[in-house]
Amino acid sequence: MSFEKFSAEIGKLLLDENDRNQTQKKVKNYLNNISGKIIGNRTVDSFFGKLQKKAASDYEIIKKHYDSKESKNEKIRRIQEIFFPENLLDYEKTAEDIRKKRRVRITGKSENQVKNPYKEILITANALLTMPEDGSNLPEDFIKKIDFTEKQKYWYDHPVPIDAPDSENEIIYGLTKLNESLSVETDEKVTVVLSVSCTHDSLNTIAKDYLREIFKNYKLGRIKVYAFTEEDVGKMLNLIFSGNNEKYNKIKKTIGVQGKYGRHYSFLKAVAAFWKYYVDSNIKATFKIDLDQVFDQKTLKKYTGKYAFENFKDDFWGASGTDSNGEEVRLGMIAGSLVNDYDIDKSLFIPDVKKPDSSEMAYDKFIFNSQKPQYISTIAEMSTRYKRGDNPIIRYHVTGGTSGILVEDLISYKPFTPGFIGRAEDQAFILSVIDKKVNGKYLRYYHSDSLVMRHDKHSLVKRTIEKSETSKMVGDYERILLFSYYADKILNKYDYIKEELFPFTACFISKIPYIIIYFRALLKAYALAGENEVDAEEFLLNLSDRLNNVIEHMDNDYYYEQYFKEKQAWEDFYNHFDGYKSFPKSFISSLSVIS
């Protein structure tokens, strides 16, 4: 069967018999090879023409597995086996198998256990800023510095418009709630470092002044907050590598906070090494939170007997052990879990991801349906509860917030997320060292079963989330391309990584990424058009615009070369921390936004 006939077969099997509108008809005609245009937009049609050729090449890998003589139901099942076999997993058996595979036999507890988390943990978070919705109420000096005609450069899930009211400002919400939760368990001040990432470059010129402005009327007595803009990171690196302009220039291209998620995520880990060796030698580890997440102290105490920061005094964090493959591992990283704000009254331990409704299986979900392995992985990893005397499990499925790493392991293993990763930067972080041994041990995440944060995004930023839904959807397609390329072409560890990270993170890694996003995107556009034709067109335009650039970079080996440049930069950065040094107090003071 030719690719053209297979495309028509996909349309026949997975689309409705009767179309609701012209957009659905155009998508169906495109799949049926009746028309070479989708919505008549030059950007979309050009991109899908290029993508179709790559999809046809991927088809050569899979065509032997498809039998056109089977029944309709058998064909649909076969399509799932080819494109997304995770759709056919058994929930309970898979979760049980994952827990067994993730179990670690502890051979030695931590030798450098966190004892005073308020002094020894550096809390980090990312402040995401975007253009104002109105702008008329901004301070005059802000208006003068911002370029309101500037094109958006970076996309984030729910950045804060700089004219957002306090009640809808995630940065205010997250830091005031952190201060409130700390006041329950300590009189000490905890240090917080923010990275400031902006959707538009000109916003960087007012970023720190904006943070100081929004907090000027708040009294936050339990936290000291410092913020790094891209310019501040440059100053930090210039001071660290003073006198070595060549090394500074190379490292500055890699280390920063302005850009895709991977760039600032790596910085928010790395800053702990800088803070320990230049600012505060008490620091032993860093722990990242998202600013729409809260430590619900009353509920934590009720269900676990501990307040939030007491969870860091855990001798499994930093422990050594043997995994199910007989390999030695070091649990130098820690990962907690989340509970949705609307579920916490029922229990602290209700998974934040819901089991997919099988009745909603339609269209693109036969090609790609990450909700199912995400739910399985959440149940198997994040929802694991220990009994007394249990050995812990390791985690691969982690979230951007509720994860941390010991400084000594940052410096020893030197993990990072490549700066070109724009989605799931948290899960990509371990890939750079997935098969690296230090003193004979692999670095892994320890699952802390009592370290749970309440996720308030649904009630806090619902309107902002709705506005960024298309961008987030497109990011999912980008993730398939980049994770597949990263595991297969850059790291050359496809089989190993696919097996280790099964099922959720691994489902985004494929040998046939182009044909997956090709059919998934067309089927998704058809589904969206059934509700709103404008949404379908916006999705196709956004996807074409962004993925065209990604595929070009993959084709010309830009990402491949960039990865190894970044790897060397991080090696040079972490190798620098071989002793405590002094740092200009004036620079640290310039970072302060809440003292």
Image (cartoon, rainbow, N blue to C red):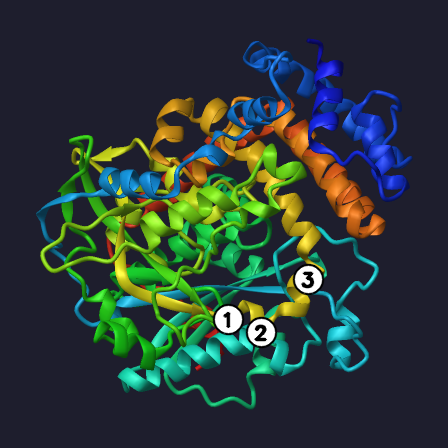
Binning the other alpha carbons within 10 Å of mark 2 as few (below 14), some (14 to 19) or many (20 upward) gives: some
Amino acid type of disc 1? Asp
Residue bearing the label numbered 1 = 456
Marks 2 and 1 in Cβ contact (< 8 Å):
yes
Q: Secondary structure at mark 2?
A: helix
Q: Name the side, left or right, on which 578 lies relative to 416.
A: left
Tell which of 292 and 524 is nearer to you.
524
Residue occupying the point 43% across, 54% down: 399
Q: First in sequence: mark 3 or mark 1? A: 1
Location of residue 66 with respect to 382 vertically, above or below: above
Residue 221 % position (x, y): 39, 87
Residue bearing the label numbered 2 = 460
Residue 264 % position (x, y): 51, 53
Is residue 95 in view? Answer: yes
Marks 2 and 3 in Cβ contact (< 8 Å):
no
Residue 18 % position (x, y): 83, 37
Residue occupying the point 70% across, 58% down: 200
Location of residue 59 with respect to 434 vertically, above or below: above
Residue 258 % position (x, y): 59, 54
Binning the other alpha carbons within 10 Å of mark 3 as few (below 14), some (14 to 19) or many (20 upward) gives: few
Location of residue 581 with respect to 215 vertically, above or below: above
Q: Secondary structure at mark 3?
A: helix
Labelled disc at residue 466: 3
Residue at the front extreme? 71
Residue occupying the point 44% across, 60% down: 352
Q: Name the side, left or right, on which 79 lies relative to 117.
A: right
Real-space CA distance between mark 3 and mark 1, rounded to the nearest whole angstrom: 15 Å
Tell which of 442 and 322 is nearer to you.
322
Amino acid type of disc 2? Leu
Real-space CA distance between mark 2 and mark 1, rounded to the nearest whole angstrom: 6 Å
Name the image quarter holding the N terminus.
top right
Name the image quarter holding the C terminus.
bottom left
